[in-house]
Image: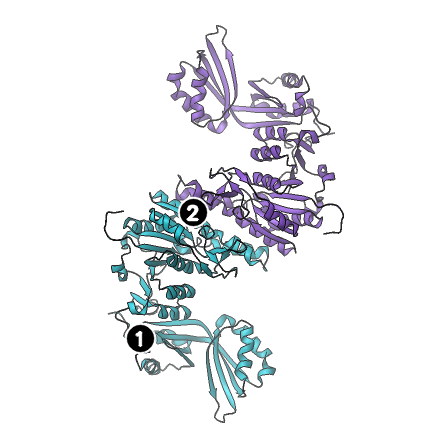
Chain colours: A purple, B cyan
């Protein structure tokens, strides 16, 4: 289009609710899209509902019947994205671009029948590709598709627009899936706590997954999983940076802005530790002096699981006499009271125990694919905390992360100390 | 369903924006629907957007680009009805009824490609009928369908939900199409002006059409035309009457509530005059002493037509010497200034004339299919007005109506006098 011999890249751009909160913001999004089109890129845009719209729709549904039919919930709530898609297409046309909106059922984005939390099964990319080849911008409703058997709209659940965007990138064999958010990338830790936190130019899918499950709200977990499976280069960018202050996508300067979530092998200089995460909404439960009979763990965690309470870290200690055990675990702070209720009801089954609980704890995690091949990462974590006099209540580890539970009062101190200890501070 | 041997009737119920303005009103609508289902009727419901929602959507579209793409306008605006349909289905389920929502594209309601003012081309009724036979209430989005070539949502234009309802009644071969509004029927004239106005139990399609085009806003003109073509019995009812204070539909007591718009032959005791209508938003334009050359009318009305200005009544008088003519006609008051501009620009073409105009006029109409077979209806109208000293500026007639233009100050007096003169006052 611009006479440039460079082959055009296909870019999927995704904008969330705050990025399209009103007409002015939608016009700002249109400027971001225009920058990519002007640079010769083919563009598909995935949009969420305008901030506040989905909440209003959900409130209406719950008012109509708290025990609502999930299929009707989907029919109602999916309209939010349809409104944004039409408005953005109109805003793009106002700037002289060719554009049209696409709903999930028009493409069609086929999903499972699990209304409200459906999974994308298939997106035929051919129709949209043809439109992109004609120089038209495709504006696609995020968060939804169609369940083909009943021909009814199905939503992917909150935050599903990230997943829609990655799935569109798969269908279009896009060069990048750019997720525009209210932050300009993924940081080594929360910059509000550690001013020396650095933007990560690249981070691996595995690390991003750990960060997502450990409290980072930048990308939805499922979208990262999908990106990992199909090796979709996914970049986190800010829609609040002025559109003309950002470079259009070129594969060779992908690292200049935002954070690219990509395959580990694309990351040349891999750090041992990529980031420090913390989660404040944790609560600790300790069952003291439980009789250590076979099957006691099942009798404790079975009822919690049946009540849909997610248990995270679990630590078990045997008392000196070996006949009783202390069992410590964490749940979401919001579910602490419900968890305690469930345990009291299960007491007859579990046998004798005293119970102690606290919501005054935080989980601090050190994440990095590099720790697979480096010894001493955990030891450095424990020593760093110990040097600051911070007591560890529980530890859990995976291949690429170490998490500890500590008193909430030490959260900032712990994050800052670890950030320095692993050499993550910017100069 | 209730063990009654009576064959079940199929009822289409249509509810407009004020009838579904909030969740409470939607639950009230659900009660109306339940009454019909409990009586053994099969029910399809056609709904508009919640009052205010469409206006908000239209405002967003116009903000995004005043010169919007009509196809994107439709994609955005059609979501209003989709929300209502889902919410009503949920409210019906909360009352223990089987119900599901249907969008225009799911049925599919096929339309022309005239986005924003599309015409319904076809509705396959089989799928919905099967659901009705299973005892399920079908809640259908009004005002919209799908343009099959491009597979895009098309709206019928403002007020199109009435047309959707009649078209659904055609597709389902329904026994009645009940249009719920904020009035409890069609009256002989406006009850706010004439307290003795009577509800008409039945009115013919032709009369309803005249009433609609003469200012009655009870039913959209196109919906009455469609009902007339397919002979759909269409009833005007109030959604603001308590649901349990109304009888469910039975063909034998159809006259007990509301006004049934039906074939002339179904009306046993046809009055000569059925109603008196008035329209305040008229303006009169008189071109004085126009040269009476061949083709002068075309030179006057051609430019108005090109400017999309609807001309209604036209009266031409020859001056005594026969060489000049006075031409009087009416336009919508809102278009008066535009009409005067057009005429000034066309002056060179038309030749000499003076221009006089007034927006201070009203059109009073007497309507009744009975006047076809009765002489003296017009004479009675002119005498009644003359007796009250009311001057007539212009007259126009059709087979079943006589309209006169008079000074606005006499509007109420004229309507009241005519209402009495034609024997329409209730006792």
Measuring from the top left, give residue B39's x and y in whole percent.
Answer: 27, 50
Going by the picture, which residue comes out furthest to the top? Answer: A321
Residue B239 vertical position relative to residue A206 in the rendered view, above or below: below
Quick one: label 1, few (<14), some, or many (20+) residues within 10 Å?
Answer: some
Q: Name the residue under label 2.
A: B86
> In the picture, residue A261 is in which quadrant?
top right
Residue A264 vertical position relative to residue B208 in the rendered view, above or below: above
Measuring from the top left, give residue A223's x and y in whole percent.
Answer: 58, 36
Q: Is residue B176 left or right of residue A286?
A: left
Residues at circles 2 and 1 in contact by the CB criterion of under 8 Å: no
Residue at 37% from the left image edge and 71% from the top image edge:
B277
Quarter that holds the C terminus of chain A: top right
Q: Are marks 2 and 1 on the same chain?
A: yes
Q: Which mark, by number, is residue B172?
A: none
Measuring from the top left, give residue A281's x and y in whole percent.
Answer: 53, 28
Residue at 65% from the left image edge and 48% from the top image edge:
A33
Q: Earlier in the sequence, mark 2 or mark 1?
A: 2
Quick one: label 2, few (<14), some, or many (20+) residues within 10 Å?
Answer: many
Q: Is mark 1 on a helix, strand or loop?
A: helix
Q: Is residue A242 left or right of residue B262?
A: right
Q: Mark 1 points at which residue?
A: B370
Residue B199 appears in the rendering: no
Callout 1: chain: B
Q: What is the spatial separation of the Cα atoms under label 2 and label 1, in whole angstroms? A: 45 Å
Q: In this view, does A315 lie to the left or right of B209?
A: right
């Amino acid at each position: 289009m611009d006479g440039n011999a460079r082959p055009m890249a296909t870019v999927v751009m995704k904008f969330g609710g705050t990025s399209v909160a009103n007409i002015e913001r939608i016009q700002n999004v249109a400027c971001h899209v225009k920058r990519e089109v002007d640079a010769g890129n083919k563009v598909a845009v995935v949009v969420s509902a305008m901030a506040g719209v989905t909440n209003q729709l959900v409130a209406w549904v719950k008012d109509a019947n708290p025990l609502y039919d999930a299929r009707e919930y989907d029919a109602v709530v999916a309209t939010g994205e349809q409104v944004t898609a039409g408005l953005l297409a109109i805003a793009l046309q106002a700037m002289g671009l060719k554009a049209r909106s696409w709903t999930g059922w028009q493409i069609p984005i086929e999903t499972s029948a699990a209304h409200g939390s459906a999974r994308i099964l298939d997106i035929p990319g051919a129709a949209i590709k043809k439109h992109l080849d004609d120089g038209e911008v495709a504006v696609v409703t995020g968060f939804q598709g169609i369940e083909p058997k009943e021909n009814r709209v199905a939503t992917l659940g909150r935050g599903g627009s990230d997943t829609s965007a990655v799935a569109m990138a798969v269908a279009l064999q896009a060069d990048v899936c750019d997720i525009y958010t209210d932050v300009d990338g993924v940081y080594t830790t929360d910059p509000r706590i550690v001013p020396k936190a650095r933007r990560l130019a690249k981070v691996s899918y595995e690390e991003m997954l750990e960060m997502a499950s450990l409290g980072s709200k930048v990308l939805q977990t499922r979208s990262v999983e999908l990106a990992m499976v199909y090796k979709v280069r996914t970049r986190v960018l800010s829609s609040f940076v002025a559109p003309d202050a950002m470079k259009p996508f070129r594969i060779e300067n992908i690292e200049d802005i935002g954070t690219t979530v990509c395959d580990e092998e694309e990351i040349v200089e891999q750090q041992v530790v990529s980031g420090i995460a913390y989660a404040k909404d944790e609560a600790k439960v300790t069952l003291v002096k439980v009789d250590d009979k076979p099957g006691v763990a099942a009798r404790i965690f079975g009822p919690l699981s049946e009540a849909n309470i997610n248990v995270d870290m679990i630590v078990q200690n045997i008392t000196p006499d070996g006949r009783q055990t202390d069992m410590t675990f964490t749940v979401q702070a919001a579910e602490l009271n419900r968890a305690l209720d469930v345990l009291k009801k299960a007491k007859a089954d579990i046998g004798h125990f005293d119970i102690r609980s606290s919501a005054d704890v935080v989980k601090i995690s050190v994440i990095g694919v590099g720790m697979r091949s480096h010894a001493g990462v955990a030891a450095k974590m424990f020593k760093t905390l110990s040097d600051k006099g911070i007591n560890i209540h529980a530890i859990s580890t995976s291949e690429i992360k170490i998490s500890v539970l500590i008193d909430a009062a030490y959260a900032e101190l712990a994050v800052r100390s670890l950030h320095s200890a692993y050499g993550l501070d910017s100069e």
